[in-house]
Image (tube, rainbow, N blue to C red):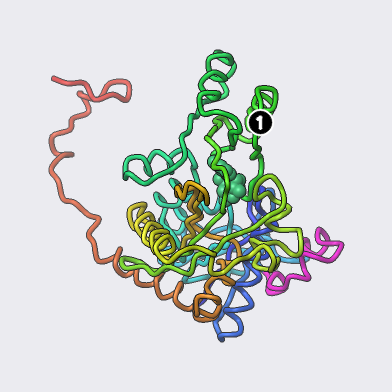
Amino acid sequence: MKIGVFFGGKSPEHDVSIITGQLIISSLKKSGHDVVPIYLDKTGAWFIDSALGTLSFFKEVGIDERLQKCGRYNIDLDLSKNKIVFKKTGLFGKTIEIELAFPAFHGMNGEDGTIQGLFEIFNIPYVGCEVAASAVAMDKILTKQLYQALNIPTTKFIYFSEADWNNNKNGLIEQCEKLQYPVFVKPPKLGSSIGISRANNRQELEFSIEVVFNYGERALVEAAVLNLKDLTCAIIGTADPIASLVQESRFESDFFNYEEKYLNDGGTQLGNAQKGLIIPADLDVETTLQIQTMAKKIFIQFGCSGIARVDFLYDSFSKNLFANEINPLPGTVYHHLWQASGIELPVLIEKLIVFAKERHQNKNKYTYGFNSDILKFATSSKLKGGKIVSN
Ligand SMILES: Nc1ncnc2c1ncn2[C@@H]1O[C@H](COP(=O)(O)OP(=O)(O)O)[C@@H](O)[C@H]1O
Ligand SMILES: [Mg+2]
């Protein structure tokens, strides 16, 4: 099976995605798979070339010239059925086809259900969560609303649009202040802590909200968890998923920010900064089990499949636990946590491919056709100006 690994993308998490993509490509190659590296640049152009399957391609200077030498491809809509066929731009461009997709995108335009929709349309198996679960998980507001509906504890929050903010600044500030300082201000659809700040007073709150509106049209403001332990539990599987050990991520900054995640000492989120990674987290057995059980429940109830990581905020004094966000495609597939939990990277990747194939087979056993007489009774005289007019 030809496996296309998709990475890069139109997202602020472009560079993290390159790291995840390369990790997956090299693991698949080592296991003898036929891998096609598919890179989306920041403008959304697709490039395919075996040279794109090495990290040095992206690290060394002169990437623009190197990219020009790679083929630029577009999807051939005509030929893409039960596979995706890419056609090189230009006259008589060659074609490359893939039969299974392994998305390695993070954040918008890739982890949020958009690319998953493309895979659904072409009916090819793909790794990771489906459209709806990806879209909900990548929206922190929808995630928290679903937590509430499912009685899963989460921090108190409010959200509003830029238009609301411009119309009723004072009223909204008052509502935010009911949550009590400090509060966390977030763009609902980003990840990697981009655009997030902790506001300790009114001035910082207003500034943080203005910052968030540079990233999107809605802002999320939530009560802060004090005495924080930042905990996470990764999940893989389909109907009966399994949970990893619980990880605590430690950081020296105000909160788990971009630098701590990816830069300091090679990054905690990339599994490198050892002093920031406590695996298993220093928790009693009951709390650990509670987290693993809740993470599995969230995975199932949100309709996740393949892989996801569920993050928790834990107040180590009051012992209150709050479900935070869900990452449908955690950076580097969180292989360091799976390794600590007894699943090595090649095995993890293999499992993800098996889950993708299983889901695809399952999906295709359902019928999508429906014979109806509806067109027999529709007459053009009833259609006026594009609207169906009743008798
Ligand atoms: N309500 C909160 N209370 C305390 N810390 C928080 C809260 N929300 C977020 N944080 C801190 O900010 C970090 C990033 O927030 P998170 O919601 O996980 O966004 P992202 O998707 O960018 O990772 C968390 O890991 C945590 O350290
Ligand atoms: Mg997070």
Residue, x 61% and y 74% (percent of image)? 25
Residue 189 visible to the viewer: no
**Residue 142 image position (x, y, % from top left):** 43, 40
Q: Is residue 350 left or right of residue 388?
A: right
Please tell me which residue lies in front, 46 or 371. 46
Q: Amino acid at mark 1?
A: Asn
Residue at point 45% right, 52% down? 134
Q: On the image, which quarter does residue 336 sit in? A: bottom right
Magenta residue check for 65: yes
In the displayed structure, does residue 131 sit left or right of residue 17?
A: left
Q: Secondary structure at mark 1?
A: loop
Segment tinted magenta in the rendering = 49-68
Point out residue 290 in the picture as x, y percentages from the top left corner: 38, 59
Q: Main secondary structure of the magenta part?
A: helix
Residue 190's place in the image compared with 355, above or below, is above
Residue 299 position by quadrant: bottom left
Q: Which residue is mark 1?
A: 200
